[in-house]
Image (tube, rainbow, N blue to C red):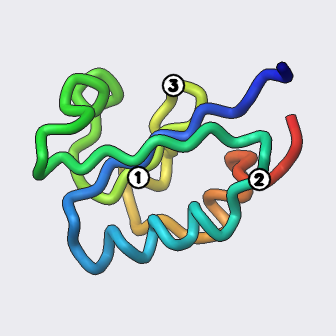
Amino acid sequence: MAEKRKVEVFIAGCPVCQGVVNMVNELACPHCDITFYNLNENEGVEQAKAYGVSSVPSVAVNGALLECCKHRPITKEDLQAAGIGRPL
């Protein structure tokens, strides 16, 4: 099986988080292995700490937190620039 891009989405069940979930799902392709972690349900807490997640929603691709998640809201363009939706 071909290698996939690992996408991890950290959320808390809020309306803003749902918007990012929708964007990721819309852009996803067969080359994306997506995992959603709801931090309010204690999912992915250790991963979030390891990546330095300080706010939600946040997205990590291939083990690295996207720069946009550190400073501003996530956009569709940010996700596409990280390779979400593109073949490897």
Give whichever of 54, 14 is nearer the camera: 14
Query: How dense is the environment of label 3, judged by Cα within 10 Å: few (below 14), some, or many (20 and up)?
Result: some
Q: Earlier in the sequence, mark 1 or mark 3?
A: 3
Considering only order in the chain, which callout, 2 or 1, is on the residue closer to the N terminus?
2
Question: The C terminus appears in which quarter of the rendering?
Answer: top right
| Image x and y of residue 39, in percent | 18, 46
**In this view, the mark in front (1 or 3):** 3
Which residue lies under the disc numbered 2?
A: 29
In the image, which is nearer the foreground, mark 1 or mark 2?
Answer: 2
Q: Which residue is mark 3?
A: 63
- Whole-number angstrom distance, CA of label 1 to CA of label 2: 22 Å
Position of 36 relative to 51 (above/below): below
Q: CA distance from mark 1 to mark 3?
A: 14 Å
- Amino acid type at mark 3: Gly
Name the amino acid type tagged 2.
Cys
Tell me whether circle 1 and circle 3 mark residues in contact (CB < 8 Å).
no
Residue placed at 22% from the left, 27% from the top? 49
Q: Residues within 10 Å of mark 1 (few under 14, many from 20)?
A: many
In percent of the image, x 33 and y 68: which residue is there? 17
Q: Which residue is mark 1?
A: 69
> From mark 2 to mark 3, how far is it between C-alphas?
18 Å
Q: Is residue 53 left or right of residue 64?
A: left
Q: Amino acid at mark 1?
A: Cys
